[in-house]
Image (spheres, rainbow, N blue to C red):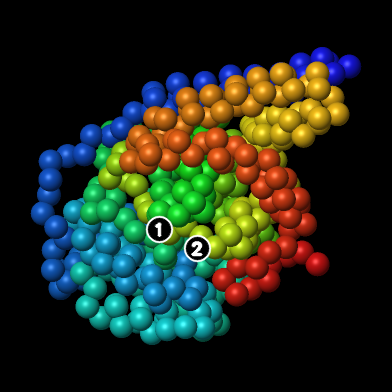
Amino acid sequence: MSSAWGLLLLAFTALYAAQMGRYRRAWQRLPAPTLPADVPPAPPARAAVAAESAAPRFSVLVAARNEAANLPHLLRDLARQTLPAAEFEVLITDDHSTDDTLALLTAATKNSPFPLRVINLADGTEAGTGKKAALQAALGRARAEWIICTDADCRVGPDWLRSYAALLTQEGPAVRFVSGPVLLTGPDTVLQTLSGLEFAGLVGTGGAGIGAGTPTMCNGANLAYHRAAFAAVAGYAGNDHLASGDDEFLLHKLHAAFPGSIRFLKHPAALVRTAGPATLAALLRQRVRWASKWRHYRHPASQRLAVLVLLANVAPAVGLLAAPWQSALLPWAVAATGLKLGADAWFLAPVLRFLGRSRWLKWVPVLQLAYAPYALLVGLAGLRGGYEWKGRRVGGK
């Protein structure tokens, strides 16, 4: 009987290892767009504002709630874009902030070096609360055909928008959705390293899935979509009651409606950086928020991947815990654990190299030890559907 259970847990891990091998190959095959020769920085403020009469190429949408401390950094990054200011506009929606976010944004519009508009959800002209309502309000006033989304607490490089322009120029009109890479940053602590490593795995898996033709995940801090495609799939309809999922539900809907139209922007210039959760409690709240949408997935590839990842993490841990009572399980559990670690390191190596975090690879065994209880805790909490975010209690009982 122990041998049968040992074979089963090893089988789960072998399936996972095979999947990671496929993902590594898909990641390495992802094309990187070629950026054109360097261009001058954005023109002065008056020239940018005057250009508002012509429709821009991109509308950058940002939902903000209590982000007065972070928005000045993002606004400075956007002001330094090498894409000419006439080719993009920025729309930031304030979602009932209780700090100085709205005042800061209102002041920023007066001397912005790019077209900047502010929408206030609290003024009664727009319906709803939360990120989706904020993004929808901004979309209703956007003028460009291509929408690019990021978050108020993110940092972007000077060629961020130009990398999107390069990809869309080179890939042509068949593209409907683009997912970009995101890196967690912060002090060099154990918590930040492990959370960053886990997040890098999610980014790599998302990019590899797109490269393999089976998109499963993306991140709302760095994505773009064609507004006509968004309208064709009715946008957030069907999941607009969920606080989370403005990114992945849209990805799944667009992939179903327009197969082969999803791309991953694998270029260092496209990288968006955001600070990782500062405490373990903040990390768990964030991950529970993400997990709360899993039970609403209707996307088979995402469901299969979630189950496979959970089994591959839990099975070796259960085998090791049971070994004192079932000694015959020990060699199977050790073999499964070694196979899982090897598969993770093999997949993560090129992803971390792209993100400039190869030093994190040595932390894979530590993350493996913590991941089984962590994944179970977050998954069960996510099934309850309740969590606190940005000072609001969302869902649950």
Give coordinates of residue 357: x percent, y percent: 37, 41
Residue position for label 1: 187
Instruction: Tell which of 335 and 200 is nearer to you.
Output: 335
Residue corresponding to mark 2 = 278
Q: Is residue 139 above or below residue 231?
A: below
Q: Quadrant of the C terminus?
A: bottom right
Q: Quadrant of the N terminus?
A: top right
Q: Residues within 10 Å of mark 1 (few under 14, many from 20)?
A: few
Circle 2: element type: loop
**Measuring 60% from the left and 75% from the top, which residue is drawn there?**
391
Residue 135 is situated, as x and y percent measured from the top left of the image, at 49, 63
Amino acid type at image mark 1: Pro
Sequence-first tag of 1 and 2:
1
Real-space CA distance between mark 1 and mark 2, rounded to the nearest whole angstrom: 9 Å
Task: Choose between 61 and 221: the one closer to the eye.
Answer: 221
- Farthest residue to the right: give it: 1
Residue 191 appears at what percent x and percent y?
A: 51, 53
Q: Is residue 81 left or right of residue 187?
A: left
